[in-house]
Image (cartoon, rainbow, N blue to C red):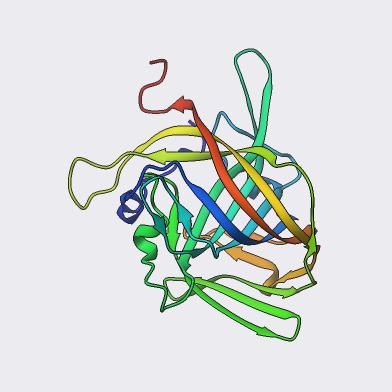
């Protein structure tokens, strides 16, 4: 299979709650941009079909309201989602469009919050999440966010903010795709890739603003060593919202095809 990923770090296998989840009072920046089409396509596993233009999405989210489950509420944290616009063709010929999640970086929002990012963001086993170092400061309407891992910068964002305007609109629904892994039976070892899932969710936006976003050095560095060039930024918004997952659908079982 083309683009079959290698083993996932063991720290992604921690799980503390299986949901369902509600994400309240989320402050999010959303950036749609273009990178190198061939490089972007190489990040997407079959049978997903990547877009031909190198279109990608970046979501920078801060969960101010924490994460609610039927049993408890977890403290808020920061999360950065990098994805590729892709689609999945079903057996009946219909297509599902969504964002294939390449990487999810997360960190404690504040050192005093008591959140532990190595556990907090990993409530669903197998999602490709990585703990990161988050640095942020504001100067007037300028916000600078810098993300690092293992002593190297992943990306830097320079955001020119704008006031949020209230919205009145029905919830938006959409899909994304994610690879999930299973825990290894041997403690301390990684797990093999298991399944490709389609995740459906609902977003209720309460306010929005158009903002300006620039990337430091016009690039994003992945753990694999791949450097994604930022060739063009197409859309940048800021919003406040609540999010609720609606369901998971198994698309492909790579370890047990045809079962």
Give the total of numbered labels: 0
Q: Residue at x 65, y 57 (%)?
A: 58
Viewer-proximal residue among 229 and 203: 203
Quadrant hosting residue 135 = bottom right
Residue 37 position in % (x across, y down): 70, 47
The correct choice, above or below, for 1 with respect to 70 in the image is above
Question: Is 61 left or right of 216, judged from the image as shown?
Answer: left
Q: Residue at x 70, y 58 (%)?
A: 30
Residue 36 position in % (x across, y down): 70, 52
Residue 91 position in % (x across, y down): 60, 14
Quadrant hosting residue 156 = bottom right
Question: Residue extending furthest top?
Answer: 92
Question: Residue extending furthest left?
Answer: 186
Residue 242 position in % (x across, y down): 61, 52
Q: Residue at x 74, y 71 (%)?
A: 214
Q: Is residue 34 visible?
A: no
Q: Residue at x 34, y 53 (%)?
A: 9
Quarter of the C terminus within the rendering: top left
Quadrant hosting residue 62 = bottom right
Question: Residue extending furthest bottom?
Answer: 139
The correct choice, above or below, for 232 with respect to 153 in the image is above
Viewer-proximal residue among 120 and 178: 120
Q: Is residue 61 visible?
A: yes
């Amino acid at each position: 299979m083309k683009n079959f990923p290698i083993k996932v770090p063991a720290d992604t296998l921690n799980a503390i709650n299986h949901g369902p989840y509600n994400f309240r009072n989320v402050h999010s920046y959303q950036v749609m941009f273009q990178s190198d089409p061939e490089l972007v396509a190489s990040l997407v596993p079959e049978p997903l079909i990547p877009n031909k233009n190198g279109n990608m999405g970046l979501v920078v989210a801060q969960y101010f309201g924490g994460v609610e489950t039927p049993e408890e509420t977890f403290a808020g944290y920061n999360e950065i989602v990098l994805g590729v616009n892709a689609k999945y063709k079903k057996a009946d010929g219909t297509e599902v469009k969504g964002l294939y999640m390449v990487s999810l970086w997360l960190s404690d929002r504040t050192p005093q919050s008591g959140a532990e990012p190595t556990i907090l963001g990993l409530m669903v086993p197998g999602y490709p999440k990585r703990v990161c170092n988050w640095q942020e400061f504001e100067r007037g309407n300028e916000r600078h966010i810098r993300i690092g891992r293992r002593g190297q910068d992943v990306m830097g964002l320079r955001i020119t903010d704008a006031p949020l305007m209230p919205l009145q609109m029905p919830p938006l629904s959409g899909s994304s795709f994610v690879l999930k892994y299973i825990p290894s039976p041997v403690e301390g070892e990684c797990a093999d890739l298991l399944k490709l899932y389609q995740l459906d969710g609902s977003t209720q936006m309460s306010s929005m603003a158009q903002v300006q976003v620039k990337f430091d050095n016009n690039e994003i560095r992945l753990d694999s060593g791949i450097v994604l060039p930022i060739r063009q930024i197409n859309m940048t918004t800021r919003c406040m919202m609540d999010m609720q997952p609606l369901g998971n659908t198994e698309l492909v079982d790579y370890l047990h095809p045809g079962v």
